[in-house]
Image: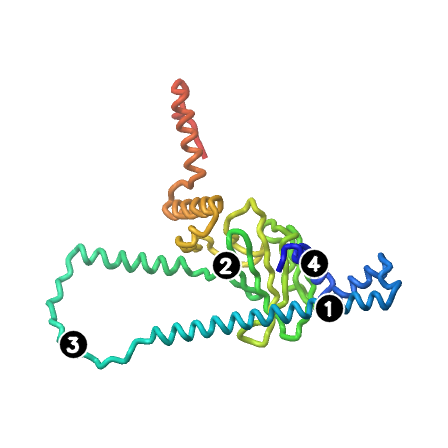
Amino acid sequence: MSEEEAMYDGVLMGIVQKAGGIDGFFEAVFGFLRRKTDFYANQQGAEQIIVKHSHTHFKKYAETKKAEEAAALKKKEKEELKKKYQQPETQQPQPQPKPVELPKPEPTLATQGDAPKEETKKEEKEERRGLPGNGGSTDKYTWTQTLEELHVYIPVHKDVKTKDLTMKLETTHALVGLKGQPPIIDADWSEKIKADDTIWTLEDARKSEDRYIHLAVYKTPNQNHWWDCVVKGDPKIDTTKIDPEPSNLSDLDGETRSTVEKMMYDQKQKQLGLPTSEEQGKMDKLKGFMKSHPEMDFTKCKFN
């Protein structure tokens, strides 16, 4: 897909969402042509244009679908071939020498002290990784997040269509629901979002016949931190339990990586009861000021 072909995707997706689906989209487009242009002045010419572009994109769709299916088949054949050659040859079991049982060492004070620590560390690590997708769930939806965006998944009945939905995703407020029913979400976002970039789709669930509303919510650029909830008033998660894999840091750009490392450092400092990087910076500035002004008496000063 070329950049020129995709340049209007944002505008067209907005029309689809506001018009309630494809039917509403075409109704809006053809209504615009009727009201604002002379497109219908020549009926035969208008019909030829519609048929021409429809056939062009049907052909493109068929070519793309065929290429995707060919690529998928090629990948499958490659995986099967690789699996075939990786299967070990059947070998007769060789007699194994009987292991010599060595006397077990008596536990010492050192070994007695080490084992519980290792178990404790393992348990703490497992506990801290108790937030799948760095998000959580409520009785209405499940959500995940990265430093830049949130994804909210709201289950609905399999018969729900886009025209049945009420959607209003603003910078500070979210309204999601079904027409004629109480809203599923009607509250302020936990923090401000990029409303122009935020989109929603109605998708089929993979492992059931139900459907779900998928909100792709983009945080404002100046945040770069974890949210503790999606909208105000809903249950909060413990963001100190978010522990991103260190190996993933290498995939981030320099500025984002620096932000993540600072967050991880501050999180660790808080758990240890120590000052964060910002608090440490204030203390260093105060020490520098005191050193530059030895004539001043700070012994009776109180600092919060």
The answer to which quarter of the image holds residue 199 is: bottom right
Residue at 56% across, 69% down? 68
Looking at the image, is mark 3 or mark 4 earlier in the sequence?
4
At mark 3, the secondary structure is loop
Q: Amino acid at mark 2?
A: Gly
Looking at the image, is mark 3 or mark 1 earlier in the sequence?
1
**Residue matched to label 3:** 96
- Of residue 291 and residue 264, the one placed in the foreground of this image is 264
Q: Amino acid at mark 3?
A: Gln
**Residue matched to label 4:** 14
Counting from the top left corner in percent of width and height, residue 107 is at 15, 61
Q: Amino acid at mark 1?
A: Ser
Q: CA distance from mark 3 to mark 4?
A: 69 Å
At mark 2, the secondary structure is loop
Residue at 58% across, 53% down? 218
- Of residue 72 and residue 285, the one placed in the foreground of this image is 72
Q: Nearer the viewer, mark 2 or mark 4?
A: 4
Q: Counting other residues with Cα less than 10 Å from the Cα at mark 2, is it few (<14), some (14-19), or many (20 or more)? A: many
- Of residue 216 and residue 103, the one placed in the foreground of this image is 216
Looking at the image, is mark 1 or mark 2 earlier in the sequence?
1
Q: Counting other residues with Cα less than 10 Å from the Cα at mark 3, is it few (<14), some (14-19), or many (20 or more)? A: few
Please state if 155 lies on the left or on the right of 132 as rendered.
Answer: right
Q: CA distance from mark 4 to mark 1?
A: 21 Å
Give the vertical position of 52 relative to 125 (above or below). below
Q: Are marks 3 and 2 in contact (CB under 8 Å)?
A: no
Residue 135 is marked as 2
**Residue matched to label 1:** 54
